[in-house]
Image (cartoon, coloured by chain):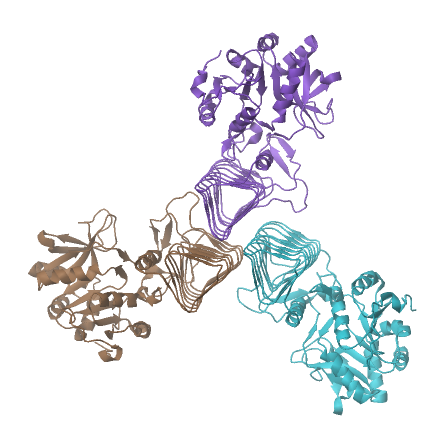
Chain colours: A brown, B cyan, C purple
Amino acid sequence: MLTNIKPAKKLTTNRNNYSCHNKTVKILFLCGGTGKRMFPLTEDKFLLNFLGRTLLEHQINLAQKAGFREFVIVGNPARMARIEQSVSQVKHASIELCEQKKPLGMADAIVQAHPHLHSHFIVVNPNDIFDISAYTNLLAAHEHKGNATLILSKKTDSYFPGGYLITGKGNVVRKIVEKPGAGKEPSNLVNIVVHLHPQVDALIEIINKQPKGNDDIYERALNELANRTGKLHTVIYSGDWIAIKYPWHVLDAIRFFLDKSRTRVSPKAWVSSSATIDGKVIIEPGVKILENAVIRGPVYIGKNTIIGNNCLVREYSHIGNNCIIGFGTEIKNSYLGDRCQTHMNYIGDSVIGENCSFGAGTITANRRLDEKQIRVKAGAELVDTGKDKLGAIIGNNCRTGIHVSIMPGIKIGPDIKINPGTIVKRDIISVEKT
Amino acid sequence: MLTNIKPAKKLTTNRNNYSCHNKTVKILFLCGGTGKRMFPLTEDKFLLNFLGRTLLEHQINLAQKAGFREFVIVGNPARMARIEQSVSQVKHASIELCEQKKPLGMADAIVQAHPHLHSHFIVVNPNDIFDISAYTNLLAAHEHKGNATLILSKKTDSYFPGGYLITGKGNVVRKIVEKPGAGKEPSNLVNIVVHLHPQVDALIEIINKQPKGNDDIYERALNELANRTGKLHTVIYSGDWIAIKYPWHVLDAIRFFLDKSRTRVSPKAWVSSSATIDGKVIIEPGVKILENAVIRGPVYIGKNTIIGNNCLVREYSHIGNNCIIGFGTEIKNSYLGDRCQTHMNYIGDSVIGENCSFGAGTITANRRLDEKQIRVKAGAELVDTGKDKLGAIIGNNCRTGIHVSIMPGIKIGPDIKINPGTIVKRDIISVEKT
Amino acid sequence: MLTNIKPAKKLTTNRNNYSCHNKTVKILFLCGGTGKRMFPLTEDKFLLNFLGRTLLEHQINLAQKAGFREFVIVGNPARMARIEQSVSQVKHASIELCEQKKPLGMADAIVQAHPHLHSHFIVVNPNDIFDISAYTNLLAAHEHKGNATLILSKKTDSYFPGGYLITGKGNVVRKIVEKPGAGKEPSNLVNIVVHLHPQVDALIEIINKQPKGNDDIYERALNELANRTGKLHTVIYSGDWIAIKYPWHVLDAIRFFLDKSRTRVSPKAWVSSSATIDGKVIIEPGVKILENAVIRGPVYIGKNTIIGNNCLVREYSHIGNNCIIGFGTEIKNSYLGDRCQTHMNYIGDSVIGENCSFGAGTITANRRLDEKQIRVKAGAELVDTGKDKLGAIIGNNCRTGIHVSIMPGIKIGPDIKINPGTIVKRDIISVEKT
């Protein structure tokens, strides 16, 4: 069923003949399903832009830093063009693209990618953000444990809706329990999908034995592997880990990437002598920062964006390309996609898609009057975000009139227009996709 | 019926004995009827101030540049004092004022002015804005065509509610058709009232023959002249032409005058060292520009006006005398009359009369959410302004409370007070004068 | 009934043995009843902070400047801890504290303080603000008139709800008429409670003769003294006098104290090089003034307060300690208590208690659209404030949402939360305490 094997050289760019013990270990990125929980953001998570690159590019770059040079990406057919466009920016890498025709889950994705894979490989969910120690720890354990399957895990304090590991002596994994429910966690170790498989054929064989029509074939295959061989081990990861499940996790991702970055002001940017640039900032080519604007880092400003007079951009904000941040706007700890326009606004603790425009005086409230934690409706769920400051979550192509007030944690969009003077107290979404 | 012939010397000021072939050609300015379509602006159009002078003064100055020194102004009795005050500022000109007791139209105005006129003269509607080539082209044609009556015209692409010319060979005018209606234009040449008459007595004679009680006696007289003598010609004008019919044309007039002007910052103005002055600006004596304000030309700022802290004034804006532009206001492509006050406002693409005051947070929306062109009610008509950005049109002596929102193309005033928090979606006018 | 005589030395601090004719004259401060008319401000007036000190401290400091060193303070038991804390800051003074167990009025307070008083003393209402000439004039008259009782008075033009003096030759007081009502004033001399009594025992004796259960025992005692001895005189005071009766008088008090103060910028404050400090300002240690902020004095800014980017603070404003004046806020002629937070607000001509927080875009209107004088409901009364500019009066611990509009003269609080977008047209008070 493999449909679209592109010759590896197509995307091989200036690759040095780099000598590295793990150069033959391929990374398999699973760029499959869209995240319904991310609505009204409609972009695949791994295609979200951070600091001028997609999350997928960041993933490849991170793996490159860890010494990997060969990548296989499995994606759904509708996304392949965008994936290809995204990774075409990456240098010194051999990247093979592979379609997964139907969204049949992780095990199927590995099966689809099988022809691209050699004996051992690492399968990665690129929607999870982690640091280089995830790879280096995994490789170090692989040196010791030879032919064991290694799965990354992290100790957590609060419930996470993923897989929990039951382990024995020496980090042997006995069982993976999927989404046990809060209070029923069998351990404090959560499975992170950065898994090293030493023998692809053996894995495929076990996968193929599992009954079809199930969501969790991959996890059941791992459990069978554990039962049968005892050769399933975990490597405990202690670095930062951000699983982008809900839109507000984008704010955590900004923080992650900005914390890891360095100040960089393009010589092709224009900064008024009366503007203030303070702290860690990344300012891309073509940016204009007008008089009396203040950029108080950590802040990222994308290409050709204009920061207007007397604006303030501060505290882990990320503004995309070709935005116009109009007169008197404050942006604080927010993510704005490309081509957004603001004017005398306050955008705080908010996540905004592409091509949104805010009428003068539109304000996002980012705190409840009772100062309680903010809960967001996600489908039928009412999710406690764990944050006492959260603004709006707005999809692509929205417009607000003047003097619009948006309450904390409200979701809008995509493609929504909001009349002037509206106080938005409930989510306004065109098509609820849950 | 001539009632108020003032001795020419009264308004003759320092006139040099200037030798010029056309020094004996007088210009007759028709300062007659008020423009109902300009409501809620109630000022006569020729008395509107641009760059510190009335439109009438600009007209006289332009004619002076073309070599004219003698002017006759016909106006209605109620306006004569203001006309006299306005033109008393003009130097090196002989100006005669003449009342038209009743508003009986253009032909009657010429009849009233007859005692002031010599053989040939140019009659001008001073509400139309044009450049010096209107006069120089007319005079050049007069050199060639001797005793023909010459009327200025302009080629237009879209319908204009004025007179259209039917012409023959050699720019001979056969007929003027008044307001034919869109789609029924007999040509693309629109009559501009800058007309050279070589023989005043002959014109008066034809006028007097026309049946009374008609609006368009003057045009019928011209048509009879064309029929009888064949000596009615047009001179096609290709410069800028702005006919101030509707209030938003004031914005076009600002653009015209600012484009033709040069930067001039009075040494009697005070500009904070932390303010920014950029581009073409005219700043009059007594102006104060406070800290962190930005003036981004083309911009005009009238006498004694204060531009407050952290304000932005930009893009073809015109602010009258003795205004206070309070903290944090942005003014973009707008006209403000004298003695206006703002405070944390956005005034965009708007036309504001005198003595208006805006509560903090009042905002003019200047764009529809659907981005369509903006239509304005003018009397019974709904006029398409041809603009996709247009703010408010506000007459003299209006006040808004705090947090007022004014929708695009809305008309307010004069003498209207708007309660705090109002979203103004319909025109609010004291007395509809249509 | 004297309950709590603290040894004078307890609060005596570094007192020099200062030789002065009046060093034995004690000042008795009446720190008794709370002011119901001050609601929603709940702080005792004499404990309000101005320029970093309570009004009571200011009173003691003023008296010290006039040469006094010994003070007795009578207060109600609930306030004694705060009074003691306040006056513990005062140096070079001997201060005795004395409880008045029940709120039985001024005569009772003097009786309670009797054990602390020597032969002659001055009784002072510390809620009235006056300058040093009140004391120096009183003492000068005392030199001349020896054993007369002296009461300070001031000529007034408009009705004041206090006591009026009927006087005879040589400033002899014949009678005090309490609150005669507007239009029924027996003179233009209003009693200011800065009274010098030459013989405390004689006074107490007369007080004790008065029938109990009356509000005005003290005034009746003075009237009896006048009748019996003829030794009641007035000293007419011509300096500034501010009687803090209603909350808006706090604004007058700011003006008084700022006018009397000098510029003082703490070296422990941080002022951005792009901020503007202009006019008379007092900036306390730990203050931060961020980029493009403008402080246009007279202005006081308390300890550790942050003035954010592009803010404007101007014209007799007083901001307490530990406030955060957020981006784009303007504060004009207003009093803010400690720990207030603003954000893109306009606070004009307003009095704000402690620990208040204003959502982005909250605006206080400070002027009626009809420009009439502003009236405020105080209990059942509708009081004409005599001001055409007055903003909001807000008690401690209030919160407003975003885009709240507060009408002129509105009272809010304490402990009130106002929903986003509300237009506050009526007082919102938790418990009406009138």
Q: C195 or A306, which is in the foreground?
A: C195
Q: B98 or C94, which is in the foreground?
A: C94
- The C terminus of chain A - image quarter: bottom left
In the image, residue C228 lies at what x, y percent? 69, 8
Instruction: Return the residue found at the far left.
Output: A229
Asked where in the image residue C372 lies, by quadrant, the reply is top right
- The N terminus of chain A - image quarter: bottom left
Q: Residue at x 40, y 44 (%)?
A: A371
Up the image or down, C38 lies above or below A172; here it is above
Asked where in the image residue B64 lies, by quadrant, the reply is bottom right
Instruction: Return the residue found at the far bottom.
Output: B169
Q: C63 or A290, which is in the foreground?
A: C63
In the figure, is residue B119 to the left or right of A36? right
In the figure, is residue B398 to the left or right of B93? left
In the image, residue A34 lies at what x, y percent? 31, 65
In the image, residue C38 lies at what x, y percent? 56, 31
Up the image or down, C390 lies above or below C145; here it is below
Marker count (numbered): 0
In the image, residue B31 lies at what x, y percent? 80, 68
